Amino acid sequence: MAIRDSMKKGTAELVVLHLLRSGRKYGYQIAQEISSRSNGLFTLQEGSLYPTLYRLEKNGYVASQKEFSPNQQRIRKYYSITEAGRAYFLEVREEYRQISEGIERILEECAET
């Protein structure tokens, strides 16, 4: 079962920032890693991924750099997390944890009744 689009928007920034913590990546690479690590349950199409990256960059949480690909055939835009992005990631991760915990409590309580 695929995750609903409305839920993806709330977690896209968190997931993208988490992946960039391990090193710089270009857009397609980020999308592939998200899909692979979630066994295909969570995917970000270009229409969601790039607006997320642009918003993160505009807010100073990621930086980008254009470079030629290894085979010199095209220019790729690589994204990396900034120090502000690392701090923002920790805030968003904690908010996500609290929301998830609250939802689980509600669901567990409803299951008991």
Image (tube, helix red, strand yellow):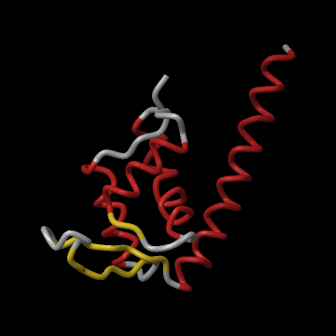
**Identity of the residue drawn at 52% across and 62% down:** 19
Total number of numbered labels? 0
Answer with left or right where residue 73 lies relative to residue 107: left
Q: Nearer the viewer, residue 41 or 69?
A: 69
**Identity of the residue drawn at 46% across and 78% down:** 61
Residue located farthest toward the bottom when viewing the structure as drawn: 83
Residue 100: give x, y in percent of width and height. 70, 44
Residue located farthest toward the left when viewing the structure as drawn: 73
Q: Nearer the viewer, residue 6 or 70?
A: 70
**Identity of the residue drawn at 75% across and 43% down:** 102
Residue located farthest toward the top when viewing the structure as drawn: 113
Residue located farthest toward the right when viewing the structure as drawn: 112
Answer with left or right where residue 49 lies relative to residue 96: left
Answer with left or right where residue 13 lies relative to residue 47: right
Residue 32: give x, y in percent of width and height. 39, 48
Residue 77: give x, y in percent of width and height. 26, 73
Residue 113 lies in quadrant: top right
**Identity of the residue drawn at 40% across and 57% down:** 30
Q: Nearer the viewer, residue 69 or 81?
A: 69
Vertical position of residue 37 compared to residue 12: above or below: above
Answer with left or right where residue 28 lies relative to residue 17: left
Vertical position of residue 48 compared to residue 110: above or below: below
Residue 6: give x, y in percent of width and height. 43, 40
Vertical position of residue 99 compared to residue 57: above or below: above
